[in-house]
Image (cartoon, grey):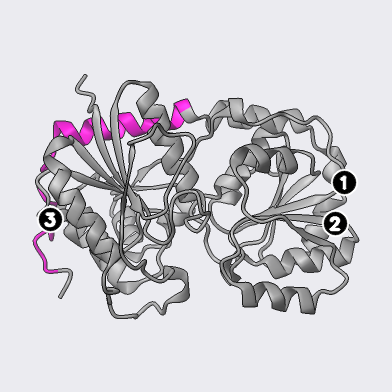
Amino acid sequence: MICPRRFLFVSTPVGPLGSGGGGGVELNLVNLARSLLERRAEVCVLAPEGSHSADLPEGVIETVTGLPPPYAQSQRRDQPVCLSTPSLVANLWQRAAQLQDQFELIVNWSYDWLSFYLTDFFRTPVVHIVSMGSLSDAVDLALEHIAYRYPGRLAVHSRAQAQTFAFARAQMAAGRDPFVYLPCGVDLSRYDFVPEGNGALCWVGRIAPEKGLEDCAALAEKTGRPVLLLGHLQDPAYWQQIQKRYPRAQLDYRGFLPTSQMQQLLGQCSALIMTPKWVEAFGLVAVEALACGVPVITYRRGGPAEIVSDGETGWVVEPDDVAALARAVERLDSLDRSRCRHQVEQHYSLPAMTERFLAWSEQIVRNPIPAAREGGDRQWYY
């Protein structure tokens, strides 16, 4: 078995590790890096200035300066590619180019056109863990090029995420799948199982329009239940609008917290509510909730709907239907919280994720420059 031992991770540029700005990508990256280090692999993480993690040894994270790109969710699909000056993304990849010969595999965690475009220009193989669905025409073209030119280099977290890309749907219809599937995993030792909830609901995530917090606020007013809010405050104006629109909602915002504190609060709640207005690639917080024994109520939209076993570990309701959320809340007592924990133990543990990642990376190291598929030499970028 050819198992690569030296990995260079290029982090998401939208926020420093530890800030919450990168959402579940931050936790996923740190979890995998720590797991690989425990297996005696060498890992270096290039990340924005200000990044930190108590879970990684000193010296693993190397910080890079520059201006971050805007959130892809806030841009138009046809937004032209434009780099900030000085560009954090460009600086991250310039440093990656300087270090590449010290590593066997470069793992890109960013969702950015330049990160995908530069795949062609590295001697060391670059693989991409794609953290979002289709949001940008330019990014879609770059991913399509990689799918043809470098089969097996793209990983996504869920089938729902994969289906958002038109080029992927076309390939699947022809009997090919351009993606490797890499569901996220958590370290179960860091999540305490709580056998009974306190009646409160919980909502966790970046406070931004695509996360649909307004539906949870409407649910709080409808049911009279308090809601604990945890996560990075990305859009203060959006948060203020929700508070004004739903004055009777009991919303208790505690900010972005480390995993140890977050899971203690989340675990006491009776349910996690997920109300995405976009296609979530995965929904790592759903796994975190289940690890604590907390059932998840989510819309039938994106990755969370693939995680939750409807009627066993939570409820999956039709998108944007607050009344359906309320009905699901009233049925929480019929669920066995121990099943929630068991589902994570069976399918979403960190060791399971690490094994999947290592199997994928072994394939790339064995065949670093595969023959391009038909159409692989097309100029996708112009």
From where the camera sits, is residue 355 visible? no
Do callouts 2 and 1 mark residues in contact (Cβ within 8 Å)?
A: yes
Range of the magenta residues?
351-379
Q: Secondary structure under badge 3?
A: helix
Q: Which residue is mark 3?
A: 120
**Residue at point 21%, 38% (across, down):** 105
Identify the image quadrant of the N terminus: top left
Question: Is 270 on the left-hand or right-hand side of 86?
Answer: right
* Whole-percent x, y for residue 50 in the image: 42, 53
Q: Quadrant of residue 147?
A: bottom left
Q: Earlier in the sequence, mark 2 or mark 1?
A: 1
The dot on residue 116 is: none
Q: Earlier in the sequence, mark 1 or mark 3?
A: 3
* Whole-percent x, y for residue 123 in the image: 9, 46
Q: Tell me the distance, in whole angstroms, between the alpha carbons under discs 3 and 2.
A: 51 Å
**Residue at point 34%, 51% (across, down):** 47
Membership of 378 in magenta stretch: yes
Front-most of 137 and 88? Answer: 88
